[in-house]
Image (cartoon, rainbow, N blue to C red):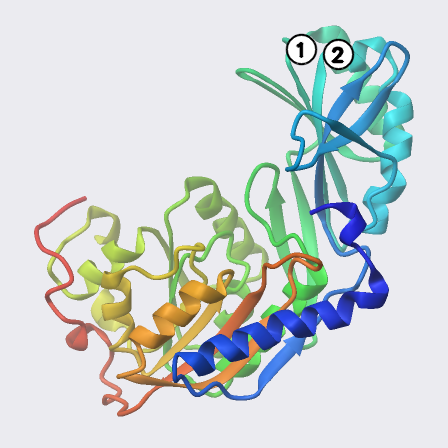
Amino acid sequence: MPLSRIDPERYFTLFAAKAERVRRDFAAAALALPELQLFASPPLGYRLRAEFRIWHTDTSIDYAMFGPADPRRAIPITDFPPAVRAIRTLMPLLRARLTDETLRHRLFQVEFLATLKGEMLVSLIYHRPLDDAWEAAARALAADLGVQMIGRSRGQKIVIGRDWLEEEIRVDGRRLRYRQIEGGFSQPNGEVNRAMLGWTRARAAGLGGDLLELYCGNGNFTVALAPLFDKVFATELSKPSVAAAHCNLEANGASNVTLARMASDEVGAALARVRTFRRLKDIDLDAYRFTTLFVDPPRAGLDAATLELARGFANVLYVSCNPATLLANASALAGSHRITAAAAFDQFPYTGHLECGLLLEQRSPAPAQGIVARVPRTLAAGSGA
């Protein structure tokens, strides 16, 4: 995103235009969309993550970005208005200290990670091995700046302090705590994430029963939704995200959540009883009475097997980072579900990207005996680990 596009005076007009495109696309697909709730971002100072290449001259270094029109031409960055104040404040202080040859030599990239709570982590990425002299200089720098720091080069990772930050987000009077791991996924726009958590909680309130969550990541939504259900079965495929989710569930006292490392199609196969998994040997799927499916999938959306699984749920709560695949999935579910709530979250201001949320309710809800008996046995076949 070119910095020239950032114009706070035009922000709300641009956000409204993105939301209107979603309305038009759903209408064109003959899907009845309820009133679209809009959740805006702060026009400036919204990003909790930023990364820059380092551009070296004979006497100095600069943060740099490269435009798509000329990817070889470095654009020096002296300030980055999309970033939260903590990152913008730290950027010149860090650059001044990186003129030290021990820290500067073959420095390739700098990555910033911040939290709403105010913690900071800086990753310095090099095209050379890091030695004891580098570590001593980095420890002094991290102490002076009051940040966590990581040095990386090929096959090397040196942690100065911690390789994670602790985030705190207040939602509906609760303080939610999250461990944000360097290199792992976390929501880049903290205030919009807060709005997303609040909206999903409001939609889930009163649904009751048990919740199945796919693509749970680091437990961002899991810890917010868990108190609203009797039991939660959450799944995620990424090992680092699963590790972070375990930490976050414990930090928030989410004792009613069971977490399994599984792909979405594997979950459907397990619930349909057409595959068995050693990973589930200590989990009694028959004990769950699922009323609600929550998904926050990758940009590709839900695959055919997961859509088939979703058709058996009384409620599908869907957060999407891609309105196009959300529309395709909602259209595929139109025969079994109707949309009863919709929202747009501007996670990435001044870009064409938009996060959306839908609550879909089953047109003829099945009895409350649970989802397991209703999942079609055509989802998969065979047995596996």
Are discs 1 and 2 less than 8 Å apart at CB? yes
Q: Is residue 209 above or below residue 97?
A: below
Instruction: Give the numbered dot on residue 130.
Output: 1
In the drawing, does residue 19 fall left or right of residue 138? left
Sort mark 1 into few (<14), some (14-19) or many (20+) by Cα contacts within 10 Å: some
Tell me what residue is drawn at x 69 percent, y 53 percent: 167
Q: Nearer the viewer, residue 137 or 380?
A: 380
Q: Position of residue 277 (x, y in %)?
A: 19, 50
Q: Nearer the viewer, residue 76 or 276?
A: 76
Instruction: Give the numbered dot on residue 195.
Output: none
Tell me what residue is drawn at x 44 percent, y 77 percent: 229
Q: Amino acid at mark 1?
A: Leu
Q: Position of residue 234 (x, y in %)?
A: 39, 61
Looking at the image, the residue that sits furthest to the bottom is 364
Sort mark 2 into few (<14), some (14-19) or many (20+) by Cα contacts within 10 Å: some
* Quarter of the view holding residue 161: top right
Instruction: Give the numbered dot on residue 134.
Output: 2
Q: Is residue 117 above or below residue 205?
A: above
Tell me what residue is drawn at x 86 percent, y 26 percent: 95
Secondary element at image label 2 = helix
Can you see residue 211? no
Q: CA distance from mark 1 to mark 2?
A: 6 Å
Secondary element at image label 1 = loop
Q: Position of residue 119 (x, y in %)?
A: 77, 45
Tell me what residue is drawn at x 28 percent, y 90 percent: 365
